[in-house]
């Protein structure tokens, strides 16, 4: 996993420093490497979630060996691992035509916004608490509103890693939002960020960004949620990267209006 993260950093994707530990908890058999003369030259993650969903990520070929078919070989292996499932990915702009040829269809774009947020102050009457203080079954059920299937092993690892700040927003005993901040080689990453309203999202973002005061954050926003786009732009963050969320099957029925940031472009 360390090598895959290093390759992803070289591509400018900036995964979290400890993401690999949670990724392996999701599907320890879902990370494939192609070797040439014993040397790793290509990679893909093909993570199984539940019985009928899968996610493709970390699709990388070393720059000097691109165009020689090595990527296609790991692609076929990854898709075989996910055979029979609705498969999703976040496709970079230059590869989206290829993904369409493989049966993927665009649902929306994820746009990465980065910078130091200005004017991010908690608002409203929600209480922000350590998400690890919330009974895990409640947190997992809340996550299930925004993700196509249960991912308990992944989520438990994602929130419990020691380098993370994980917060839940609670009002009158009910979960109203959830967000996680994690360190990365570049800007610290926020994801997921779920919220019942823009005010709740703002409060969570202010508290999470406050864990790294004065330093840049990066957040991957679904452009189909106009409130999320408006929020990050109002805070002065700048768009730096985009990828299309694509599926081979039907677009899952998730609460897109509550997704202010996706968890990860590598695993969904």
Image (cartoon, rainbow, N blue to C red):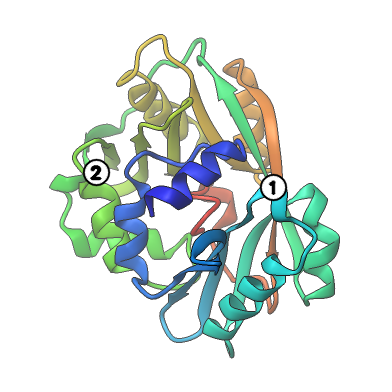
Residue depicted at x 71% and y 41%: 242
Q: Quadrant of residue 107?
A: bottom right
- Asked if 147 appears above or below 167 in the picture, the reply is below
Are dots 1 and 2 in contact, CB under 8 Å?
Answer: no
Q: Position of residue 14 (x, y in %)?
A: 51, 36
- Asked if 13 appears above or below 40 in the picture, the reply is above
Residue depicted at x 35% and y 35%: 182
Given the current orientation, which residue lies at the most extreme bottom position?
Answer: 84
Q: Which residue is mark 2?
A: 172
| Eye-nearest disc, 1 or 2 | 1
- The label on residue 63 is 1
One can see residue 208 in this view: yes
Q: 89 or 220: nearer the eye?
A: 89
Residue 156 falls left or right of residue 206: left
Badge 2: few (under 14), some or many (20 or more) residues near its Cα, within 10 Å? few
- Asked if 31 appears above or below 200 in the picture, the reply is below
Considering the numbered disc 2 on the image, is that residue within a helix, a strand or a loop?
A: loop
Q: Quadrant of residue 200?
A: top left
Given the current orientation, which residue lies at the most extreme front position?
Answer: 37
Q: Position of residue 65 (x, y in %)?
A: 71, 55
Q: Position of residue 27 (x, y in %)?
A: 37, 72
Q: Quadrant of residue 241?
A: top right
Badge 1: few (under 14), some or many (20 or more) residues near its Cα, within 10 Å? few
One can see residue 173 in this view: no
Residue 70 falls left or right of residue 182: right
Q: Name the image quarter holding the N terminus.
A: bottom left
Considering the numbered disc 1 on the image, is that residue within a helix, a strand or a loop?
A: helix
């Amino acid at each position: 996993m360390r090598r895959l993260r290093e390759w992803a950093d070289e591509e400018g994707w900036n995964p979290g420093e400890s993401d690999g530990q949670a990724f392996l908890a999701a599907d320890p058999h879902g990370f494939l490497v192609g070797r040439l003369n014993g040397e790793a030259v290509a990679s893909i993650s093909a993570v199984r979630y539940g019985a009928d969903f899968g996610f493709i990520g970390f699709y990388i070929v070393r720059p000097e060996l691109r165009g020689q078919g090595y990527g296609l070989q790991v692609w076929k292996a990854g898709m075989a691992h996910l055979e029979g499932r609705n498969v999703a990915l976040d496709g970079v702009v230059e590869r989206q035509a290829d993904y369409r040829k493989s049966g993927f269809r665009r649902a929306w774009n994820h746009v990465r916004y980065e910078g130091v947020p200005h004017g991010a102050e908690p608002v409203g009457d929600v209480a922000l608490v350590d998400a690890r203080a919330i009974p895990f079954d409640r947190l997992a059920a809340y996550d299930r509103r925004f993700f196509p299937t249960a991912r308990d092993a992944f989520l438990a690892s994602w929130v419990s890693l020691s380098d993370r700040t994980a917060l839940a927003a609670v009002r009158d005993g009910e979960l109203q939002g959830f967000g996680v901040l994690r360190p990365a080689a570049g800007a610290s990453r926020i994801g997921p960020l779920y919220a019942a309203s823009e005010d709740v999202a703002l409060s969570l973002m202010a508290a999470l960004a406050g864990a790294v005061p004065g330093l840049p954050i990066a957040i991957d926003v679904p452009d189909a949620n106009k409130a999320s786009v408006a929020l990050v732009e109002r805070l002065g963050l700048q768009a730096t990267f985009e990828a299309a969320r694509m599926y081979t099957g039907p677009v899952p029925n998730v609460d897109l209006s509550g997704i202010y940031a996706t968890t990860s472009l590598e695993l969904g």
